[in-house]
Structure formats: C-alpha cells, structure tokens
Image: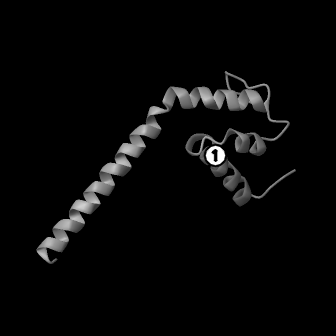
C-alpha cells in the first residue's frame, strides 16, 4: 500500500501524538503496519516490541512532558498578569 506525502505526514504526526502526548498505545498499535521492521540498533521485532520501546523512551524522557506542563502554566499565569495590568492601567 502506498500513500501520498500529506497522508503519510498525518500518520506520522498522529503516531507521535498518540504515543508521546496522549499515551494511547492501542492507537499506536493501530498505526504501525503489521509488516513494520525497525532498523534501529534496538530493533523492534514486532508492533508490541515497538510499543514497548516507545514506553521505555517515554519513561526515560517523561520529565519533558512535566516540564512542558510547567511551562504552559507559567505562560498562562504571565498572560493573566499582563491582562490584569492592562485592565488596571486602562491600556
């Protein structure tokens, strides 16, 4: 099966969103082709291996998700502070 570049890019985006953002490993399994061959040094031999590797990587770098949440909260609080100053000063 072949797909156009736009469709392929959408599948890749969905794979990373499902795996690293939503932690929806069932969806990841749906996205990885049955004949998937991983040529990396770790070398997943099956879809289940690929999801297992994804979980390991997430565990190693899961702190990135926590840092992103802290950054989002910080930006939100700065936005609220800026809005408050703007309202108080009448700008």
Residue 25: x and y in percent read 68, 39
**Which residue is situated farthest in the left direction here?**
89
**Which residue is situated farthest in the right direction here?**
1
Q: At 49% across and 30% down in the image, what residue appears?
A: 61
As drawn, 57 above or below 2: above
Residue 55 shown left or right of residue 29 in the figure: left
**Which residue is situated farthest in the top direction here?**
41
Quarter holding residue 86: bottom left
**What residue does disc 1 label?**
18
Residue 40: x and y in percent read 68, 26
Q: At 60% across and 47% down in the image, what residue appears?
A: 17
Q: In front: 53, or 3?
A: 53
Badge 1 element:
helix
Crowding near the residue tagged with mark 1, few <14, some 14–19, many ≥20 C-alpha atoms within 10 Å: some
Residue 90: x and y in percent read 14, 78
Q: How many marks?
A: 1
Residue 49 shown left or right of residue 77 in the figure: right
Q: Which colouring convention does the figure follow?
A: one colour
Q: In front: 3, or 16?
A: 16
Residue 9: x and y in percent read 67, 54
Q: At 44% across and 33% down in the image, what residue appears?
A: 63
Quarter holding residue 58: top right
Q: At 80% across and 28% down in the image, what residue appears?
A: 46
As drawn, 12 above or below 55: below
As drawn, 78 above or below 22: below
**Figure quadrant of the C terminus:** bottom left
Q: In front: 13, or 81?
A: 81
């Amino acid at each position: 099966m072949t797909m156009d570049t736009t469709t392929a890019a959408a599948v890749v985006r969905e794979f990373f969103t499902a795996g690293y953002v939503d932690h929806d490993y069932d969806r990841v399994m749906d996205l990885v082709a049955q004949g998937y061959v991983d040529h990396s040094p770790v070398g997943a031999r099956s879809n289940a291996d690929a999801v297992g590797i994804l979980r390991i990587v997430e565990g190693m770098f899961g702190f990135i998700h926590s840092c992103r949440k802290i950054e989002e909260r910080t930006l939100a609080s700065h936005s609220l502070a800026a809005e408050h100053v703007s309202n108080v000063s009448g700008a």
